[in-house]
Image: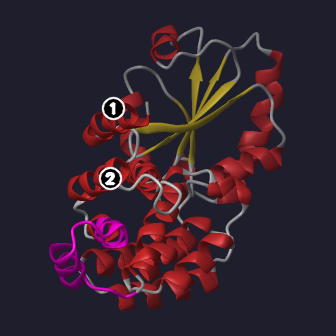
Amino acid sequence: MADASNDLLDVTAGSFEAEVIEESFRRPVLVDFWADWCGPCKMLMPVLAKLVEAYGGKFRLAKVNSDQQQGLASQFGVRSIPTVMCFRNGQVVDQFMGVQPEPTIRAMIDRYVERPSDRIREQAIAKLAAGDSAGAVADLRSAVESDPDHHSLKVDLAQALLAAGDTAGAETQLNMLPMDVHEQEAVKQLRARLVFAKRLNGADLASLEQAVRENESDPEALERLAAAYMVAGRSQEAMDLYLRLMQRHRSYGDNAGHKGLLAAFEVLGPRHELVNQYRRKMVSLLY
């Protein structure tokens, strides 16, 4: 934990890198852009100072006088004051403008301060990366129990359950998330992956490949193999099969090939290099 006497300080262009950017890799840093003539800035400052004391070193408050540090204000696109930006791991991750009530500011800080369950989460993610999905599930269940309002833990638990083959458990975890969390990109991608995993119904990749070799005109075999390829991370092969379904079996499963491609795009994300390529191929088949 940082020195509590250094939780609130003035920063300049010369000290910004060390006091804000570097410090943000250890804990959140709130940067308050203000000026002497700004009445709302003077209203906001006591609230921020109170929170600094209440959080006892879990975040730092760095004050930037916008009149004296115009270069910093311009660099970060500050158009009105007060503007408060939250830095984490060297980047601006959140911000607000104007005077905000204390609960609103607390909610923002709470999204980025380290929690005891974060250590368990890191341990579980390492286990999952190493292939120990059962160990990851056990750790994440413990973390969720100790910190039930930390919704990222539930997303991670759903991912671990999916990796362990428990599609029903993964779906249950996702269904318990608040509506606003459902809109997060990671949750949308996980739901799309869940669709593929459920389609396998326990079948292994080798048996599904054999089924397609034996009958390449079977649309169900093609669809299930495409889903298996998506689960295995072989997304290009999967999308080729979904395109084949669209070409040859448009009526199967209410255009299952089209639906599969859309779900694949969701898993890969809009910036993946294959998405635009296969979206164009899909559109050419549709029209």
Quadrant in which the C terminus appears:
top left
Q: Which residue sits at x=43%, y=45%?
A: 24
Secondary structure under tag 2 reads helix
Residue 39 seen in this snapshot: yes
Which residues lie in the magenta part? 202-226
Q: How would you rate the neighbour count of disc 2 (Cα within 10 Å): few for under 14, some for 14-19, many for 20 or more?
A: few
| Quadrant in which residue 151 is drawn | bottom right
Q: Where is residue 147 in the image (x, y as percent from the top left)?
A: 63, 77
Q: In front: mark 2 or mark 1?
A: 2
Q: What residue type is labelled 2?
A: Arg
- Using residue 245 as the reference point, say whether residue 96 is left or right of it: right
Q: Residues within 10 Å of mark 1 (few under 14, many from 20)?
A: few
Residue 3 appears in the picture as rendered = no
Which quadrant of the structure image shows residue 201? bottom left
Q: Position of residue 106 (x, y in %)?
A: 73, 51
Instruction: Inspect the magenta stretch and tell me whether residue 75 lies in it.
Output: no
Q: Residue 248 carries which label?
A: 2
Check residue 280 in the rendering and tell me which mark sits there, or answer none: 1
Q: Is the magenta stretch mostly helix, strand or loop?
A: helix
Q: What element carries label 1?
A: helix
> Looking at the image, which residue is at 41% across and 45% down?
23
On the rendered structure, is 1 left or right of 8? left
For residue 253, side relative to residue 176 (left or right): left
